[in-house]
Amino acid sequence: MISVEDWTEIRRLHRAEQMPVRAIARKLGISRNTVRRAIPDDAPPKYQRAPKGSIVDAVEPQIRELLEQWPEMPATVIPERIGWDRGLTVLKDRIRDLRPVYRAADPASRTVYEPGEIGQCDLWFPPADIPLGFGQVGRPPVLVMVAGYSRRITARMLPSRSGSPDCTKERSTLAPPQGPGEELPTAHLSRTTTTSRESTCPGRKGLGLEVVPNWLLG
């Protein structure tokens, strides 16, 4: 059985980072079947008590009640709330094991990606008018992509604000210019591209986060 910490991290990576099963298994050093079982499981793994029991077992329900209301309550405060007058080490160990069950996953937590694993694609609109030539100015949209590994940013200004770009058609324009015989570095390629708005890549169905496979490697 996996630990509560691994269960929490699996669900965070899958839901918040949209990381595939294979990548999660490689990152955490566990099997893909274990990852697949953990993703749909809405309940965390149950804490397994020591076979011989513990003096903390009697107060565990009180600890759980406190952590359910205040997941970040310090381990030094909990003993006072439950009237604990025995050794603190065994109590703090139990609190450390139980706390991840009630602590919400942080969707903003940074994840380290492998080279070429993922890229983020979206539209950016300039905050001021830009000269377009022939005496005209405007604020045309800019298609931007950030590589998950290298954090390299590439962008292309689109000719019109009406209509959305075709990610497949525009993929080559976001690749950095190369000289004769040069190849695009692996760190700047992306096997998977995500976008935070549906209008960025029309024709794709989703609820805000879209995944476009083989966006640059197509």
Image (spheres, grey):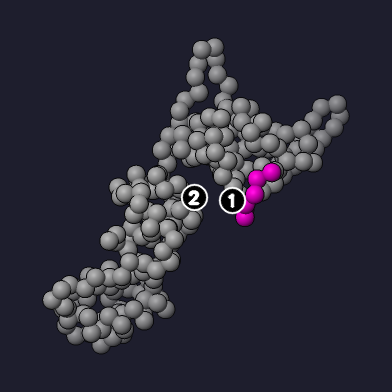
Along the line of sight, the residue nearer the viewer: 167 or 68: 167
**Quadrant for the N terminus in the image:** bottom left
If you read the primary sequence from the N terminus, does the residue marked by circle 2 or circle 1 appear first?
2
Magenta highlight range: 203-209
Along the horizontal axis of the image, is 59 left or right of 66? left
2 and 1 marks in contact (CB < 8 Å): yes
Write the residue at 38% across / 58% down.
37
Point out residue 209 in the picture as x, y percentages from the top left corner.
59, 51
Q: Amino acid at mark 1?
A: Leu
Give neighbour class at mark 1: few <14, some 14-19, many 20+ (Cα, 10 Å): few
- Report the disc number at residue 108: none
Q: Is residue 216 above or below residue 91?
A: above
- What secondary structure is found at the residue carrying circle 1? loop
| Residue identified by numbered label 2 | 18
| Residue identified by numbered label 1 | 209
Write the residue at 32% across / 73% down.
74
Q: Amino acid at mark 2?
A: Gln
